[in-house]
Amino acid sequence: MIYDIAKPLFFRLPPETAHGLVHRSLEMYQQTPLRSVVRDRYRVESERLQTTVFGQQFPNPVGVAAGFDKNAEIAPALGSLGFGFVEVGGVTASPQTGNPRPRMFRLPEDRGLINRMGLNNDGAAVIGERLDRLDTDFPVGVNIAKSEDVDPEDAPGDYRETYEQVASGGDFFVVNISCPNSQGFAELQNRDSMAAIIETLQTAGAAPLLVKLSPDLPEPAVDDALSIVEEFDLDGVVATNTTTDRPASLRSPARVEGGGLSGEPIKARSTEMVRYVAQRVDVPVVGVGGISSAEDAYQKIRAGARVVQLYTGLVYEGPSLARKINRGLLELLDRDGFESVEAAVGADL
Ligand SMILES: Cc1cc2nc3c(=O)[nH]c(=O)nc-3n(C[C@H](O)[C@H](O)[C@H](O)COP(=O)(O)O)c2cc1C
């Protein structure tokens, strides 16, 4: 309700300014007693939504995707809004300012966003300390990315340096080799580069370890990536990141901007990727891309996602989205006669 009133005002601000405002408000709010009041109203408590994936217990399957809480500052606030987990980051070894602004664009007619943030973040040391101070009753994952100034051949050591600084505070770790907005990422998704990065991280002790894939990977490259997932016995696959593709259906003027497209326009494609991965490898899939309703989340779950995440949906639907999705999921489970979310995973495969 409140967001219905606030949204037109937010949408008059540049997207990054609006995000900054929301971020600062959540940071202040999470230090007040209001947080537990809101939590009691927004967290949908149901055993049917609980799930255990890669050794972590999720109170519900709806999480916040990487990029929303880049610096690990607002996970408690996001948890109080009813999210079942948060993936912080992308984190790089040293602080980065990212690309020049503007670098985030709304596509309201398409319910999408384009961003070319370029992995702006406070750096692994600062974020690692924040993670160590966090006390949450839900899993917090860390998205680890390659530093802008590091060449692809030096990527393994760079990922390890970052991992070591965030290791003690994360519940799971996502190797981001699919960022379309920073130098040198395109080469990281080939077989040898990916294997070298993963081997280095595993040797350093990174677990549970997941890999995040681009929806733009051609099928043979996906198959290569999945063979690495199996070879290294990875704990999961996150599908998908944003796309550099521009579907012909886009109507918003901002479609011409460079960067990664997210939201409704990538929904079907990322669901297909979830399905493709779930059909081929026996590891948990985290489904992400265009989720803004219970039906969207449910489709990804039925296509094989064990848990789901979202970012762009929050911009268009506002802070009650996790509650709406969790309540809706319970109704959909009832409708289709599933005992639990876990029972619905892969129902369409
Ligand atoms: C502004 C913005 C920043 C993002 N930053 C990251 C990031 O740092 N690392 C990453 O792996 N994904 C990042 N993403 C991608 C999201 O985590 C997610 O994979 C993608 O947006 C698709 O989900 P959505 O349609 O629900 O937004 C970012 C997305 C947006 C919109």
Image: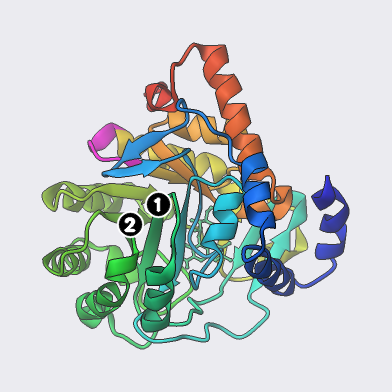
**Residue drawn 28% across and 53% down?**
221
Q: Decide: is 224 above or below 115.
A: above
- Residue 338 location, x and y as percent? 46, 16
Name the quarter where the N terminus is drawn: top right
Query: Is 155 a magenta residue?
Result: no
User: Answer yes or no: do the residues labelled 2 and 1 have beta carbons within 8 Å?
Assistant: yes
Q: Residue at x 27, y 72 (%)?
A: 163
Q: Nearer the viewer, residue 131 or 65?
A: 131
- What segment carries the magenta color? 279-285
- Tell me the crowding category of disc 2: few under 14, some 14 to 19, or many 20 or more residues within 10 angstroms, Cα based: many
The residue that mark 2 highlights is 171
Name the residue located 44 percent from the left edge and 38 percent from the top edge.
272
Secondary structure beneath dot 1 equals: loop
CA–CA distance between discs 2 and 1?
6 Å
Q: Position of residue 174 (x, y in %)?
A: 33, 60
* Helix, strand or loop for disc 2: loop
Where residue 139 is drawn, which disc sits there?
1
Above or below — where is 258 with respect to 209?
A: below
167 left or right, relative to 290 = left
